[in-house]
Image: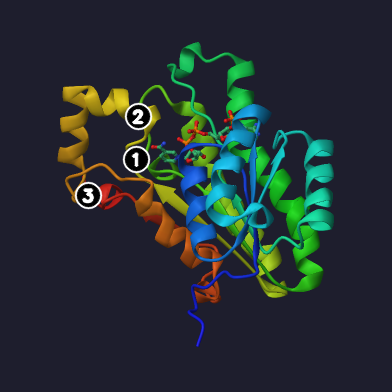
Amino acid sequence: MPSVFDLTGRVALVTGSSRGIGLAIAEGLADAGATIVLNGLDPARLEDTRARLAQRFGDDRIAARAFDIVEEAAVAAAVESIETDVGAIDVLVNNAGIQHREPLLEVSLADWRRVVDIDLTGAFLVGRTVAARMLPRRAGKIVNICSVQTDLARPTIGPYTAAKGALRNLTRAMTAEWAGDGLQVNAIAPGYIHTEMTQNLVDDEEFNSWILGRTPARRWGTVADLVGPAVWLSSHASDYVNGQVIFVDGGMTVVV
Ligand code: NAP
């Protein structure tokens, strides 16, 4: 009997998957059997990643589309071309996101809008474009990548905190409108993940010991820690899980 976590034959679009967390999730979904459509902004980096994954999984299992998740026409064209050339999208992971560190009093309106656009509006735009095709098929999985900042604030990351908090409620709004037609929309909220991007924080003794002291699991997360929850929320194993945010944070958000 196939596993309830098996994704063989499913098509998964993972936004922001040319590197980082999105890439790890894309590889994890491919390991579970899915055909993957990678996405990012930089076409050269995206092609490098596509070629690398294609060596492991085969060219027919790894596609790529470079587009900006906040450009409505580009999103529509990309989704159309994926459905025509790769297949109907079964799984969408809204992962692309950015950070901007500055005290709220100093954040320019342009920077505020850029963060809210990419971290919130992009998930709305790609989400509803894909959902419009999933709904008549009465099946589909959408996974929005939130953050511990969905629940907790910290100084100097106000726009990100606002956008990631709203992304939780967008997950609920999508659930309210689409769950009755067979879609499951959920979110993963990663804690502090040790990646290239956070290496400087790991190397910062003071910050590192604050993280270790603040995290019941007493370690940083790894991208591998996110793969199991992503496969679960993309598979039949989560068919009655609707509108939830799964915190993968070593327990950080449940203690003070
Ligand atoms: P990352 O390494 O900076 O990668 C970001 C990815 O998003 C890249 O593939 C980038 O493409 C793409 N991207 C950025 N803006 C885009 C746009 N407008 N349209 C399409 N693609 C775009 O980020 P990450 O650290 O892996 O984070 C991924 C997600 O996890 C984000 O939503 C982030 O908020 C969340 N998260 C991260 C952490 C952490 O510790 N890193 C913790 C909690 C939550 P290019 O390569 O072309 O630039």
How much space separates mark 2 and mark 3, taking CA atoms? Answer: 22 Å
Q: Residue at x 18, y 50 (%)?
A: 216
- Position of 116 with respect to 133 (left or right) is left
Q: Residue at x 77, y 33 (%)?
A: 71
Q: Nearer the viewer, mark 1 or mark 3?
A: 1
Look at label 3 and name its amino acid. Answer: Val
Which of marks 3 and 2 precedes in the sequence? Answer: 2
Which of marks 3 and 1 precedes in the sequence? Answer: 1
**Is label 2 in a helix, a strand or a loop?**
helix
Residue 183 image point, x, y percent: 66, 68
Q: Which residue is mark 1?
A: 193
Residue 213 visible to an observer of this rendering? yes
Q: Nearer the viewer, mark 2 or mark 3?
A: 2
Looking at the image, do the residues carrying marks 2 and 1 touch, with CB atoms under 8 Å apart? yes
Residue 151 image point, x, y percent: 40, 45
How much space separates mark 1 and mark 3, taking CA atoms? Answer: 18 Å
Look at label 2 and name its amino acid. Answer: Thr
Looking at the image, do the residues carrying marks 1 and 3 touch, with CB atoms under 8 Å apart? no
The quarter of the picture where residue 103 lies is top left
Whether label 2 lies within 8 Å of ligand 1 gets the answer: yes
Residue 90 image point, x, y percent: 68, 64
Whether label 1 lies within 8 Å of ligand 1 gets the answer: yes
- Of residues 166 and 27, the one nearer the viewer is 27
- Position of 225 with respect to 46 (left or right) is left
- Of residues 227 and 71, the one nearer the viewer is 227
Dot label at residue 233:
none
Look at label 1 and name its amino acid. Answer: Ile
Dot label at residue 198:
2
Q: Residues within 10 Å of mark 2 (few under 14, many from 20)?
A: few
Residue 53 image point, x, y percent: 55, 47
Q: Residues within 10 Å of mark 1 (few under 14, many from 20)?
A: many
Which of marks 1 and 2 precedes in the sequence? Answer: 1
